Image: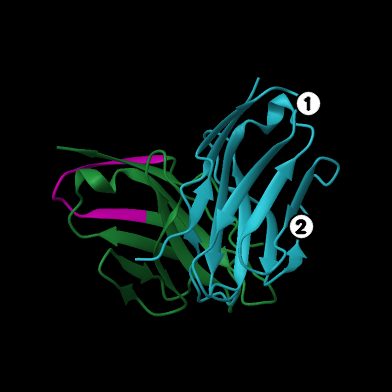
Chain colours: A cyan, B green
Amino acid sequence: EAEVAQSPRYKITEKSQAVAFWCDPISGHATLYWYRQILGQGPELLVQFQDESVVDDSQLPKDRFSAERLKGVDSTLKIQPAELGDSAMYLCASSRLTFPSYEQYFGPGTRLTVT
Amino acid sequence: DAKTTQPNSMESNEEEPVHLPCNHSTISGTDYIHWYRQLPSQGPEYVIHGLTSNVNNRMASLAIAEDRKSSTLILHRATLRDAAVYYCILKQNSGYSTLTFGKGTMLLVSP
């Protein structure tokens, strides 16, 4: 069964350093999502791509976060500089299309700890 | 976005049925009702979704009230592997709709 791949699984970084996360969605899935999940809360959408285009980045802190999906396949989420409050689980998900009847498939996530 | 209300936690015994409630009194006519679950240290996993009619799949059943203001996720025989946080989410039928997660219901299953 196809899965969403994410790397690294765990990342520890110091405050003010740069960090990057990678996501490879299920083959053929046009829509890709990045979520952030703080411990004890549900995931929160950061950015949504349709193919290579950003269609929703309203909750992305653009002063320090950036995301790209250059060829409409895999994607990278970057934080520069990292802050203590960025410690969280970063989840990537994909779906065939954005229609409400389509489910999203989530990867295992990257656990980020900022010290 | 229309909001959902779920109990913070529920408990069940293994091999017994579990009914997880969700209230969504402000649901619009075209909102889909989605359920996802998140096992410890994993990403969320799709469980089931529906619009108006009750739905069944290999994981669970979804019972939707006639007025659509509430729904119930039914696990027919809980196992220890069903212990997870269950999220009830309304997904809009417009544009690039996505999932807005609340805090969900933490299901505890005892042997």
Residue under mark 1: which chain is it in? A
Q: Is residue B108 above or below residue B97?
A: above
Secondary structure category for the residue under label 2? loop
Q: What residue sits right under mark 2 in the picture?
A: A57
Q: Which mark is residue A104?
A: none
Q: Is residue A108 above or below residue A38?
A: below
Please state which of residues A113 and B39 is positioned toward the viewer in this rendering.
A113
Q: Residue at x 34, y 75 (%)?
A: B55
Q: Is disc 2 in the same subunit as disc 1?
A: yes
Segment tinted magenta in the rendering: B9-20
Nearest-to-viewer mark from 2 and 1:
1
Please state which of residues A81 and A36 is positioned toward the viewer in this rendering.
A81
Q: Mark 2 vs mark 1: which is more N-terminal?
A: 1
Q: Identify which amino acid the numbered label 1 is placed on.
A: Ser
Q: Position of residue B18 (x, y in %)?
A: 25, 53
Residue under mark 2: which chain is it in? A
Secondary structure category for the residue under label 1? loop
Q: Is residue B97 above or below residue B103?
A: below
Can the viewer see residue B75 in this picture?
A: yes
Mark 1 surroundings: few (<14), some (14-19) or many (≥20) residues within 10 A = some
Q: Is residue B17 magenta?
A: yes
Q: Which mark is residue A16?
A: 1
